[in-house]
C-alpha cells in the first residue's frame, strides 16, 4: 500500500469538483464592467459551481484519467465483431486538411467541388469492391445503414403493392438486425443455425413464402464463419419474391476477394469505421454507407452526389430526381450528407492500400484469427474449429471452465490484470459463455503470441486454482463493479456534499 494509492504510476484520481477550490482559476479574467442588468431579476445569484483549477492541475487530471483507459494505441483490442484495428496517422493528417476540415454543409456547391469529388471517388471504390450498382453514403453507422437498406426494401415492396410483413434473421445475428427489422414495422422470425454454425438452408427454404419481405444475413457471420450457401440462399429468397439484406460489418474478412454483388445480395451496409479503419468506439463517429443491387438502386435515399461533365452537384430534393438516378427514392434520413471526416479517412486508407493492399488486409485478418484459433483450441473450447478454418474472428465457449465454478466473465476480468482489453463476451448467443476474439490484420505475430501466452497461462491457472480468480481484477484502478446498477442507475451529475438535489 502506498499513501497516494499509486500502483505502477497510476494515481487515484478524484473528480475535478473534488480537486477544485473556488478561489483557484486557470485564467486571468478582467474585472466585470458595471452594467445595468437587463435580465429582469432572472440573473443567477449563486456561483455556477464549476470546479476551480489551474491549467496544470486540469491537464494532469485528464492525462491521468487517459492512462486508466485502454486504447488501440496501447495494445491489442481483441473485441470480436468490432474490428478494432489500427487507424493510420496518414488518415488523420488528410482529414485535417483545411479544405476538408473547415467546410460547412451549407456552403455553395461551387465552393466544395473537391469534397464532393472525394465522396464520389469513395462511392466508386465501394461499388467496385462490392460489385453493387449504387451506394448511399449518408447513413451514420452500421445500424443506421441497416435501417437505410430495410427502408429501401420496404419501398420496393410498397412500389409493387406487396404488403409483406415478415423478416427472417438467423439466431446468430447482431442485435441490431432484428431491432432494425422491427423498427421498420416487420415481424421478426428466427432462422436456426445448423451444427456447423451456418444458416440451416432447409429450414430457411421451408419458411420462405409470400409474407416474407427479406432475410437479413451477416456474412461472414457472427461465429466468424463464411456462409457457403449464400448464393443458394439468395436464389431461394428471390424466387419467393423477397430481398436479401447482408450485414456487411464483417467485410474486413473478404474485402478484395469476394464481391457481395456476386452472391445475390440486394443491400449491404459497410462500416467504414471497421473495415476502412476510421476510429470508433470512444475514438470517433461511425459511418455506414449502403450498397444496393440494380433491383434496389432506384429506391436509394437522398441526398447523393451527381456528376455531370466535370461538375458535381448535390441532389437534395425529390424534384431533382431523374429516370436514371434514385428514381423512386424512399427519401432522406440525415440532415446533411454523411460523415465527411470519415469519408476522407476511408478514402485515404483505400488509396494508400490500393486494390492489392486491400486484398492483403483480408488475407492477413483471416490468417491472424486462424493463428489465434489453432494456438488456443487445445486449452479453450472451440465449438466450430472442427468444421475448418474460421474467417476474421475466432469463437470459443466457456466449456473448458466446467467444474471450476468460473465463467467467461472471470476470464475477462483476469485479462485486465494481464494488461489486455477483454474479448467480446457472451456474443453470439449460439454458444455457451461465448468469447469472440478478433485480432485484425494490424497485429504482428509477436503481439498475438503475447496475447496467446497470457490466455494459455490463464486457462491453466484458472483450472489449477479457481479460487484466486473470483475477484479479479486486482491491478486495475477499480475492482469488480456493480455493472447492473451502473447501467440502470447511472450517476451523471456531481452534487456538492450537503447540497440537496433540488438546489
Ligand atoms: C458493428 C456491427 C453492427 C452495427 O454497427 P454500428 O456501426 O455499431 O451501428 C452490426 N452488425 C455487426 C455484425 C456488427 O459487427
Image: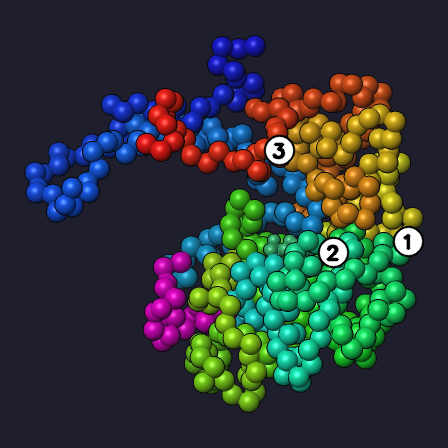
- Residue labelled 2 has its Cβ within 8 Å of some atom of ligand 1: yes
Identify whether 30 is placed above or below 216.
above
**Residue under the image location 57 percent in, 38 percent down:** 488
Which colour style is shown? Answer: rainbow
Mark 3 vs 1, N-terminal side: 1
Q: Residues within 10 Å of mark 2 (few under 14, many from 20)?
A: many
**Which span is picked out in magenta?**
101-119
Say whether residue 208 is left or right of residue 412. Answer: right
What residue did someone put label 2 on? 173
Q: Residue at x 51, y 50 (%)?
A: 284
User: Camera-side residue: 135 or 371?
Assistant: 135
Q: Quadrant of ligand 1?
A: bottom right
Q: Residue 301 placed where, x, y %?
A: 54, 74
Q: Nearer the viewer, mark 2 or mark 3?
A: 3
- Where on the picture, by quarter, is residue 160? bottom right
Element type at marker 3?
Answer: helix
Q: Which circle's residue, 2 or 3, is located before the other in the chain?
A: 2
Residue located beneath label 3 in the image: 483
Label placed on residue 195: 1
Can residue 59 be seen at all in this image of the molecule?
Answer: no
Question: How many angstroms separate mark 3 from mark 1 (CA)?
Answer: 34 Å
> Tag 1, which secondary structure?
loop
Q: Is residue 109 visible?
A: yes
Whether 105 is among the magenta residues is yes
Q: Position of residue 350 (x, y in %)?
A: 59, 62
Q: Is residue 138 magenta?
A: no
Q: Is residue 284 left or right of residue 249?
A: left
Q: Residue at x 76, y 48 (%)?
A: 428
Amino acid at each position: 500500500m502506498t499513501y497516494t494509492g499509486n500502483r505502477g504510476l497510476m494515481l487515484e484520481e478524484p473528480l475535478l469538483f473534488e480537486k477544485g477550490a473556488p478561489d483557484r482559476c486557470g485564467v486571468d479574467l478582467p474585472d466585470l464592467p458595471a452594467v445595468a442588468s437587463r435580465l429582469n431579476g432572472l440573473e443567477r445569484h449563486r456561483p455556477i459551481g464549476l470546479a476551480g483549477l489551474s491549467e496544470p492541475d486540469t491537464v494532469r487530471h485528464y492525462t491521468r484519467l487517459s492512462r486508466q483507459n485502454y486504447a488501440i494505441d496501447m495494445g491489442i483490442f481483441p473485441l470480436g465483431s468490432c474490428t478494432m484495428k489500427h487507424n493510420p496517422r496518414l488518415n488523420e493528417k488528410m482529414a485535417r486538411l483545411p479544405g476538408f476540415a473547415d467546410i460547412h454543409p451549407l456552403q455553395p456547391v461551387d465552393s466544395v467541388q473537391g469534397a464532393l469529388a472525394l465522396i464520389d471517388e469513395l462511392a466508386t471504390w465501394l461499388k467496385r469492391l462490392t460489385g453493387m450498382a449504387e451506394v448511399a453514403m449518408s447513413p451514420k453507422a452500421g445500424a443506421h445503414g441497416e435501417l437505410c437498406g430495410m427502408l429501401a426494401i420496404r419501398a420496393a415492396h410498397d412500389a409493387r403493392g406487396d404488403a409483406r410483413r415478415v423478416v427472417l434473421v438467423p439466431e446468430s445475428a447482431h442485435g441490431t438486425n432484428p431491432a432494425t427489422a422491427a423498427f421498420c414495422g416487420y415481424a421478426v422470425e428466427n432462422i436456426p443455425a445448423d451444427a456447423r454454425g451456418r444458416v440451416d438452408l432447409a429450414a430457411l427454404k421451408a419458411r420462405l413464402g409470400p409474407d416474407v419481405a427479406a432475410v437479413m444475413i451477416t456474412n461472414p457471420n457472427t461465429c466468424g464463419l463464411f456462409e457457403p450457401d449464400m448464393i443458394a440462399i439468395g436464389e431461394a429468397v428471390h424466387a419467393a419474391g423477397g430481398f436479401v439484406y447482408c450485414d456487411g460489418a464483417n467485410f474486413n474478412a473478404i474485402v478484395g476477394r469476394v464481391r457481395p454483388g456476386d452472391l445475390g445480395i440486394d443491400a449491404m451496409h459497410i462500416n467504414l469505421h471497421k473495415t476502412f479503419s476510421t476510429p470508433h468506439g470512444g475514438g470517433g463517429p461511425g459511418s455506414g454507407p449502403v450498397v444496393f443491387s440494380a433491383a434496389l438502386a432506384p429506391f436509394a435515399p437522398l441526398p447523393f452526389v451527381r456528376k455531370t461533365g466535370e461538375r458535381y452537384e448535390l441532389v437534395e430534393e425529390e424534384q431533382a430526381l431523374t429516370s436514371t438516378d434514385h428514381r423512386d427514392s424512399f427519401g432522406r434520413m440525415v440532415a446533411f450528407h454523411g460523415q465527411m471526416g470519415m469519408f476522407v479517412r476511408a478514402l485515404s486508407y483505400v488509396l494508400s492500400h490500393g486494390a492489392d493492399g486491400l486484398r492483403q488486409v483480408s488475407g492477413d485478418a483471416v490468417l491472424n484469427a486462424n493463428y489465434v484459433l489453432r494456438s488456443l483450441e487445445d486449452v479453450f473450447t472451440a465449438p466450430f474449429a472442427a468444421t475448418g478454418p474460421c474467417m476474421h474472428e475466432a469463437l470459443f465457449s466457456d466449456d473448458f471452465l466446467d467444474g471450476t465454478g468460473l465463467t467467461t466473465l472471470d476470464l475477462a476480468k483476469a485479462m485486465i490484470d494481464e494488461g489486455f482489453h477483454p474479448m467480446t463476451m457472451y456474443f453470439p448467443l449460439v454458444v455457451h459463455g461465448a468469447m469472440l476474439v478478433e485480432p485484425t490484420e494490424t497485429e504482428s505475430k509477436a503481439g498475438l503470441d503475447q496475447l496467446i501466452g497470457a490466455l494459455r497461462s490463464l486457462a491453466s491457472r484458472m483450472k489449477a486454482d479457481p479460487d484466486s480468480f473470483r475477484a479479479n481484477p486486482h491491478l486495475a484502478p477499480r475492482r469488480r463493479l456493480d455493472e447492473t446498477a451502473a447501467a440502470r442507475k447511472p450517476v451523471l451529475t456531481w452534487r456538492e456534499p450537503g447540497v440537496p438535489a433540488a438546489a
